[in-house]
Amino acid sequence: MVTHESCQQQYVVPMPWETFIPLGLLTVMFGASGTLLNAARRFQNDGKPPDYCLDKWDEMMQERNQRLTGSLRGQCAEEKAPLTFQTSSAWPVEKVA
């Protein structure tokens, strides 16, 4: 309460509760959009966090993993490659006449 000495009246300063609704909506929407963006990126990467700063070696390993497992981020634990890996070469082949 604020008291003005000349009038001897008491003024009640209201709390602006109506400002909390947009603030809450903005907070929830930023949180939801960030969570959905993170979930979409992880879904595209087979549940793993995204890769940054890939060099040539990483790109070659991703191409190999793509041919072995069908996924860029998938890995195979078998010691022998499947028979289909023999015919899915990374080198382009042209028929020589």
Image (cartoon, grey):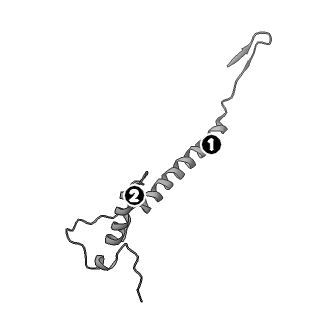
Q: Tag 1, which secondary structure?
A: helix
Say whether residue 27 is left or right of residue 61: right
Decide which of 84, 93 is in the foreground and name it: 93
Residue highlighted by disc 2: 56
Q: Is residue 66 left or right of residue 3?
A: left
**On residue 41, which mark appears?**
none
Q: Is residue 89 above or below residue 33?
A: below
Write down the quadrant of residue 14 in the picture. top right
The residue shown at (50%, 55%) is 37
The residue located at (31%, 71%) in the rendering is 68
Work out which residue is located at the far left of the displayed protein and give it.
79
**Type of amino acid under label 1:** Ile
- Image coords of residue 13 (percent x, y): 70, 25
Q: Quadrant of residue 85?
A: bottom left
Front residue of 50 and 60: 60
Residue under label 1: 21
